[in-house]
Image: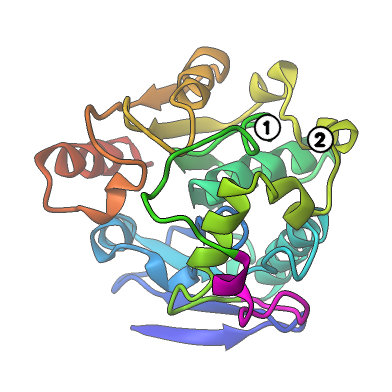
Amino acid sequence: MSENITLDSGGTVAVARPEASAKGAVIYIHGGGFVYGSKSDLPQALQNVFLNKGYIMLAIDYLLTPNSSLIDSLNQMQQTLEELQEKEIKDLPFTFCGRSAGGFAINYLTKQLIEQNKTLPTQLVHFYGYSDLAFINNPRELTDTTVTKEMIANINQSDKIWDDPFLQRYLLYIYGVQQQKLSDFYQTSTKDNSQFVIEKDILQKFPRTFSSASTTDEEVPFKYSKQLKRLIPDCKFVPVYDLGHDFLKHTEDEQVEKVLNSLEEWLE
C-alpha cells in the first residue's frame, strides 16, 4: 500500500508500507544535482528490497535550486526528518538511502546529526554520491547537446519548487554544468564550500554503510565512493564496471541485480 502525505513545511512524502509490521523506516532522497529530479524516481526493484525486508519507505521531496539555496534545501531536509520522526518513524530505527545528489544529502545530514549529538540512522545506503562540492564546476561531458540560455528561459527559477516529476528542469541542470554555474545555482562561493565538506574524522563516525558506484561514472568521480569504503569503518562497497552514472535505473542489468541482491543480504 502506498500513499502521499503532506508535511507542515509544504513538502510531500511518498509512503510505501510492508505487508507485515515494520521493523524500520527508510528515508529516500533522490538525485538530480539539487536542480531537478523527483521522489517518484525510486526504482521499484530497489523499493521492493526494502519492503521485503520489512521497512517502511519514505521518499521525500526537497527544495530545488536555484529557486532556493543549497543550504536552505539541506536544512529543510533535516526539518523533514524531524517531522517524520514525530509522525511516522516514532520509535522505529531509520535508514538513509540516497542516489547521487541524494547520496551527498544523506552524508551531510548524518554529519549534522553527529555534530548535534542527535539520533543517527542505523544504516546508510549510498549510490554514487559524494562528500564535498569540489568537482561541481569541473568540465563534464554529460550530453552532446549544448543548452543555451534561450532553451531554459521558460523554466521557473524563482518560486519555491519541491518536486520535478516530469524532469522538466533537466535542461537547467545541464546548462548549469556546461556553463559551470552550479555554485551560482546553489548560492555558494568557493570560500563557502568548506561547510559542505564531510571531513574524514566525521566519516569515521558514520554508521554501517552500503555503497555502490560505477568505475566509468561520467558525472560524479568514482573516487568518492572509494573514499567511503576507506574511511567508514563498516562499509560494504559493491562496484560496477563500465556502466553509466545512474545505473540503478537499469535494474534488468546483471551487475545491477547483483548490487540489489548484495544490498538485500546486507540489510539488517
Lateral position of residue 105 relative to residue 256, left or right: right
Main secondary structure along the magenta-highlighted residues: loop
Give the residue displayed 33% in from the left and 70% down from the top: 18
Counting from the top left corner in percent of width and height, residue 50 is at 34, 57
CA–CA distance between discs 1 and 2? 8 Å
Counting from the top left corner in percent of width and height, residue 51 is at 31, 63
Q: Quadrant of the C terminus?
A: top left
Position of residue 155 relative to residue 126, above or below, is: below
Position of residue 53 relative to residue 22, above or below, is: above
Residue 188 is one of the magenta-drawn residues: no
Q: Nearer the viewer, residue 86 or 42?
A: 42
**Which residues make up the magenta segment?**
149-162
Question: Where residue 218 is drawn, which disc sits there?
Answer: none
Give the amino acid type for the residue marked by disc 2 in the picture.
Answer: Asn
Q: Nearer the viewer, residue 187 or 261?
A: 187
Give the residue displayed 36% in from the left and 49% down from the top: 144
Q: Quadrant of the N terminus?
A: bottom left
Q: Is label 1 in contact with label 2 (beta carbons under 8 Å)?
A: yes
Question: Where residue 193 is drawn, which disc sits there?
Answer: 2
User: Label 1's element?
Assistant: loop
- Give the labeled residue for mark 1: 132
Looking at the image, the residue that sits furthest to the top is 230
The answer, for residue 257, to whether it is visible in the render is yes
Counting from the top left corner in percent of width and height, residue 34 is at 62, 57
Count of number-bearing discs: 2
The answer, for residue 119, to whether it is visible in the render is no
Q: Nearer the viewer, residue 101 or 17?
A: 101
User: Label 2's element?
Assistant: helix
Looking at the image, the residue that sits furthest to the right is 191
Q: Earlier in the sequence, mark 1 or mark 2?
A: 1
Position of residue 248 relative to residue 32, above or below, is: above
Give the amino acid type for the residue marked by disc 1 in the picture.
Answer: Asp
